[in-house]
Image: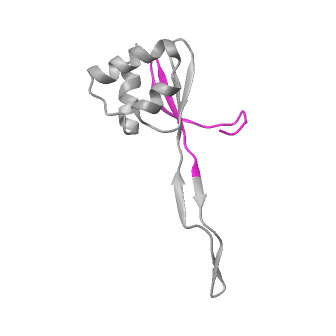
Amino acid sequence: MPDSADVFVEVLVEKTASLYVFRTVRMEGSVNNINGVERYLNRITPEPKYILLLPDHQTSIITKISKHHLLKTLPEKHKGTIKDIIQQNHLSMRNENDLSKLVNLID
């Protein structure tokens, strides 16, 4: 994330635990000059960074939504609770909606 005081994030959940997303994109490709017309990008890839603020004000930054990556980024004392919530509520942890549902269920 940029090192600035002026960073704007989207609020996805604000409760006991909060979830924010900082949306960035990566531009891939090269400059192509075709008949005097320059073409710059072949692809624009979204790269969101999710910021999870836990009830004890610890934060985790999640760059890829998956159960494995989520548990890897969490502080040790929260891993068991989060794993239980995922299993009890049958969350697939494959998209932003699942991540939001999880954060809504954290007490």
Can you give x and y, in whole percent of width and height, for residue 97 in the image? 36, 36
Question: Could you say which quadrant of the image residue 38 lies in?
Answer: bottom right
Can you give x and y, in whole percent of width and height, for residue 80 in the image? 40, 15
Residue furthest to the bottom: 35
Looking at the image, what colour scheme do you see?
one colour
Question: Could you say which quadrant of the image residue 79 lies in?
Answer: top left
Residue at the spot 45% in from the left edge and 25% down from the top edge: 71
Q: Is residue 16 in view from this perspective?
A: no
Can you give x and y, in whole percent of width and height, for residue 82 in the image? 40, 19
User: Which quadrant is the N terminus positioned in?
Assistant: top right
Residue 8, relative to residue 102: is it above or below? below
The span picked out in magenta is 1-25
**Magenta run includes residue 79:** no
User: Which quadrant is the C terminus positioned in?
Assistant: top left
Residue at the spot 34% in from the left edge and 17% down from the top edge: 84
Left or right of residue 69, residue 2 in this image: right
Residue at the spot 49% in from the left edge and 12% down from the top edge: 77
